[in-house]
Image (tube, rainbow, N blue to C red):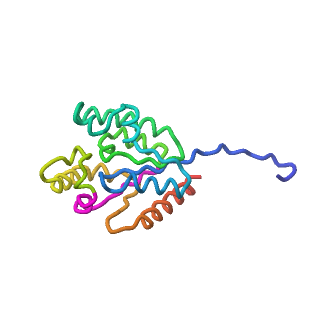
Amino acid sequence: MSRGRKQVKRPLKRKPNIVLVGFMGTGKTSVGRRLSSQLRMHCVDTDDIIEQESGRRINDIFAEDGEPAFRQLESEAVHKVSKMCNQVIATGGGVVLKEANMKKLKQNGVVFCLTATAEEIYRRIGHQTHRPLLQTPDALAKIRTMLAERHPYYAQADYMVKTTGCSFGEILAYIKKVFQHTVARNL
């Protein structure tokens, strides 16, 4: 420090979150875990919070209480994680359906929407039985319909990230580059 000059302390800015939204099967949880490891940030998944706090599996909540009850628990989880900082937050596929959820997540986060084609999503998760919204005779048709319905909601993300045909390395490099540039620009 030089003499005669008063050092001005700037308040430390909270490090924002990386928020991953997108349809089920686009890789939010897998990408989130890898990102958090590489960036030395904590990783939190809203579905895990719901299961831990309710003491029930997502499938059971849907079966016993219905989708509206699940969406309420999801909003509560979003409220909780949106207050955190320096997190990689993986969300459920329908978190974007409530405008309030997106507003909260954007308050202290950069929102990336992971995307994939309907066919790729079906290839990745069509066989899984723990996806309550896909327990239908024609899961691929259901995926196409839901993607079309949710497209305007997903488009509210700060950045769109295509995952079809991309390696984890490519996806992670893109998100890290954009996030670091965004954080540096806002300092």
Q: Quadrant of residue 133?
A: top left
The magenta-colored residue range is 110-124
**Measured from the top left, where is residue 83 in percent x and y?**
49, 37
Report the residue at 41% width, 48% height from top.
90
Q: Residue at x 13, y 53 (%)?
A: 138
Give the residue displayed 33% in from the left and 52% down from the top: 22
Query: Residue 146: x and y, percent?
Result: 21, 50
Horizontal and vertical percent position of residue 17: 49, 48
In the rendered image, residue 164, in percent from the top left (x then y), is placed at 31, 65
Q: Is residue 181 above or below residue 106?
A: below
Q: Give the vertical position of 61 relative to 1 (above or below).
A: above
**Outermost residue toward the left in this view:** 137
Magenta highlight on residue 11 = no
Residue 184 falls in image quadrant: bottom right
Query: Residue at 30% of width from left, 44% of height from top?
Result: 94
112 part of magenta stretch:
yes
Q: Is residue 7 left or right of residue 3?
A: left
**Is residue 134 positioned above or below 182 on the image?**
above
In the depicted view, which residue is nearer to us: 174 or 123?
123
Disc tally is: 0
